Image (tube, grey):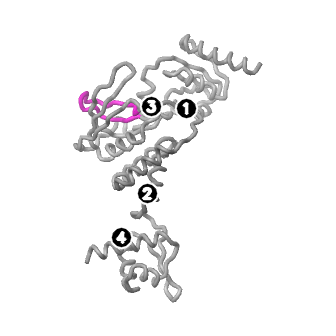
Amino acid sequence: MTSDMTARVLRLLSLLQTRREWAGADLAERLDVTVRTVRRDIDRLRELGYPVDSARGHAGGYRLTSGTDLPPLLLDDEEAIAIAVALRSAAGGLTGIEETALRALAKLEQVLPRRLRGQVTAVQTSLAGITWEERGPRADPALLATLAVACRDHEIITFDYTTRRNPANRRRAEPCHLVDSGGLWYLVAHDTDKDDWRLFRLDRISDAVPTGRRVPPRPVPGDDPAAFVASRLSAAPTRHRAVATVHASADHVRARTRGLASRLTPIDEHTCRLDASDDHLPRIAQTLAGLDSDYTLDADTDPETIDHLRTTAHRTLRALS
């Protein structure tokens, strides 16, 4: 009896989500119950936090309205697929909502039926987009979802990690936060073997496996994951050195150099110093070209960087002439 009532209330909720307003008699007919039973089920939905408005009289009816909190939603197969694909796309490239999208995706994929997971993967792999600006290696959305769940549940994970100098080796860590910096994703985690905080680039992580062991949440040094990532990145060595004195305010340059805020030093109101060092020479040229301001390269910029910038400038001049 209870299961029948639960199924009927869920069916009622699904109907209310498909139309702006329902007459009580129409709902009763759809559910094969009396109008009085519909009224009782509406009251049950209200007790569960669903804001259902009603109008009395012959032309009265019921409608689901907005409330102060978001109650659980019922999705059909097509709606669930559309939302999962949209969340995966957001996690891959829309600035400012990536981690929120990942948390939502983790919740959805946890309850998504197996038959729908295959459809989501098929749709995602069939879609193509145009990338106008290459910001570096992209992380695998499936890996992002796995790590997002581990961060949320404070679950220890193991994975293979490859660095620029060393081949892949197995790591074990307590994941804490995912941070996007200039198009590159980083995992902030506490390395259990080294007993220290570490920063892992997601494009260098493979074969991530949750262990099933959960631990109490561990606060990030400084209680600011983004600041922790920025401080580690600014201290990390790069292959190519490029430091420029820019004849523009720090705010002007900051707005045009995504992910380099920690490498920007104001000199005065109209001048600042930017460390545009990078492992990729074309990215240095792209960063400097995007400043939309005059600049001079400092003496500690390495010769290889200067040669690349000179070659790029000559190529542009030849094209213009």
List x then y, in percent, for residue 94.
52, 43
Is residue 191 covered in magenta?
Answer: yes
Mark 2 neighbour class, 10 Å CA radius: few under 14, some 14 to 19, many 20 or more? some
Residue occupying the point 68% across, 15% down: 314
| Quadrant of the drawing holding the C terminus | top right
Could you tell me the amino acid type at mark 2?
Ala
Of tags 2 and 3, the one toward the viewer is 2
Above or below: residue 41 compared with residue 284:
below
Sequence-wise first label, 4 or 1: 4
The magenta span reads 186-202
**11 vs 301, nearest the viewer:** 11
Sequence-wise first label, 2 or 1: 2
What kind of element bears circle 4?
A: loop
List x then y, in percent, for residue 254.
57, 33
> CA–CA distance between discs 4 and 3?
43 Å
> CA–CA distance between discs 4 and 2?
22 Å
Circles 2 and 1: CB atoms closer than 8 Å:
no
List x then y, in percent, for residue 21.
51, 76
Of tags 2 and 1, the one toward the viewer is 2
**98 vs 225, nearest the viewer:** 98
Q: Which residue carries the number 4 mark?
A: 48
List x then y, in percent, for residue 33.
37, 83
Of tags 4 and 2, the one toward the viewer is 2
Could you tell me the amino acid type at mark 1?
Glu
Q: Which residue carries the number 3 mark?
A: 230
Sequence-wise first label, 2 or 3: 2
Q: Which residue carries the number 1 mark?
A: 134
Mark 1 neighbour class, 10 Å CA radius: few under 14, some 14 to 19, many 20 or more? few
Could you tell me the amino acid type at mark 4?
Leu
Quarter of the rendering containing residue 220: top left
**Left or right position of 159 against 25:** left
